[in-house]
Image (cartoon, grey):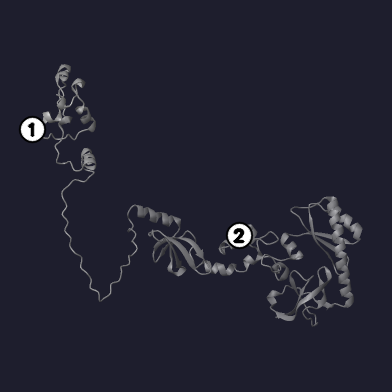
Amino acid sequence: MTEVVSVRFKNKGKVYFFDPNGLTVSPGDKIIVETAKGMEYAECVAGNHQVDDSTVRPPLRPVLRLATPEDINRAQENHKREQEAFEVCRQKIEKHQLDMKLVDVEYNFEGNKILFFFTSDGRVDFRDLVRDLASIFKTRIELRQIGVRDEARMLGGLGICGKPFCCAQFLDDFQPVSIKMAKTQGLSLNPTKISGTCGRLMCCLKYEQDAYEELVKNVPKVDSFVETPAGKATVLDVNILRSTVRVRLEDQLDSPIRTFDASEVEVLGGKAKRAEYLAMKAQGKVDPPKSAPRFKKAVPASQPVEEPREISVSVQDEPHPQEQPRRQRRSGQKGGNRQDQPRSQGRRRQEPKSKGEQRREPHQPQGEAQGQGESKPRPSGNPRRRHRSRKPSNPGTSQPPSAQ
């Protein structure tokens, strides 16, 4: 175990360990520490405490002293000079028309070095800019290009959750975040919903990734072909946190969408297994689906159950309406049942008469032709033919019987 003091620079960014060097430091104290850049003004986050040796990166630099009033005034003056240097550098960038965005300016505690942080999409030739800045400030100038995540850490702000940025509060370094994490957690793949203010994927996607990876192992994937208590089905949706799956049954038509617990489902395969099952089902090699059970009305025990009665029905051997001749069906619909009537002989082809015989044949009234009141059967042939037969052959003799 090693005794250390946790220190943060400019109230944001990463926390560093320093050797207390025999001093007792309390959280919130301003201290002067030794760094690779020289002396720096910092703030204590956690006082003297013990940490594991594996978390300490040697060499462990010491705390020089607690900040005096002169040190605090000097830090305030450096802060004012940083604001002035920021405005001067921004004007020089516009003058040289450089494709870069100035983010922050930092003075070291001793005041002999100025560090300019900027962002850019590509490489920038800022040699002329450095010459102008060195001629103005008469000190050492350094320009450092940073990424958009470092820019968000320096500037700070509020995330979509309403809290300050994680990178500006407690994150020591940026861990890689991929779109696969959003898919595993079932989040929307809309970039505006899973991206932070910096334009990159949110760092908080990494927080629960390990837990989701363990839960995913216990549930089937979407589009998997599974065996359920109700039969074979295809997975439509998976609720990872509740360990439930929503499936579409293949052998039921009334309610094919069901929800089961992940422990009740057995994975048979993927889309290829489902296609094989459907092919076997089409060939008849799979048992037909069982119909849903029908619920019968319960009969009280006191009430006797009536036995079904035997009903005898005599059915005449009549041909089906579709099997009857078309003429008989039509005559039955219009003029009732005409099955007992004799068929007309009009369909038989007779020898045509000569024109002389047709002219000599007088028109006979219906009563004289039939004789002693005998009724002549009405032909059931084509009504048009009947109408032609009633037309008198000789128009000159078309008079009623009384006139003759």
Q: Point out residue 114 in the picture as x, y percentages from the top left corner.
A: 85, 63
Classed neighbour count for the residue bearing mark 2: other residues with Cα under 10 Å, few (<14), some (14–19), many (≥20): few
Looking at the image, which is closer to me, 91 or 376?
Answer: 376
Quarter of the view holding residue 351: top left
Q: What type is the residue that disc 1 sits on?
A: Gln
Q: Which mark is residue 241?
A: none
Q: Point out residue 173 in the picture as x, y percentages from the top left corner.
A: 70, 67
Sooner in the amino-acid sequence: mark 2 or mark 1: 2
Looking at the rendering, in which quadrant would you find the N terminus? bottom right
Looking at the image, which is closer to me, 212 or 392?
Answer: 392
Q: Residue furthest front?
A: 403
Q: Residue furthest left?
A: 372
Q: Residue at horizontal 85%, vertical 57%? A: 89
Q: Which mark is residue 372?
A: 1
Q: Residue at horizontal 87%, vertical 78%? A: 68
In this image, 246 relative to 122: left or right? left
Quarter of the view holding residue 342: top left
Tally of marks: 2
In this figure, which residue is indicated by the disc labeled 2? 179
In this image, 302 relative to 92: left or right? left
Judging from the image, what secondary structure is the residue with disc 2 in? helix
Looking at the rendering, in which quadrant would you find the C terminus? top left
Looking at the image, which is closer to me, 4 or 197?
Answer: 197
Q: What type is the residue that disc 2 sits on?
A: Ile
In this image, 49 relative to 232: left or right? right
Give how far apart the Cα atoms at labels 2 and 1 are.
109 Å
Q: Residue at horizontal 58%, vertical 69%? A: 210
- Up/down of 348 relative to 267, above or below: above
Q: Point out residue 184 in the picture as x, y percentages from the top left corner.
A: 56, 63
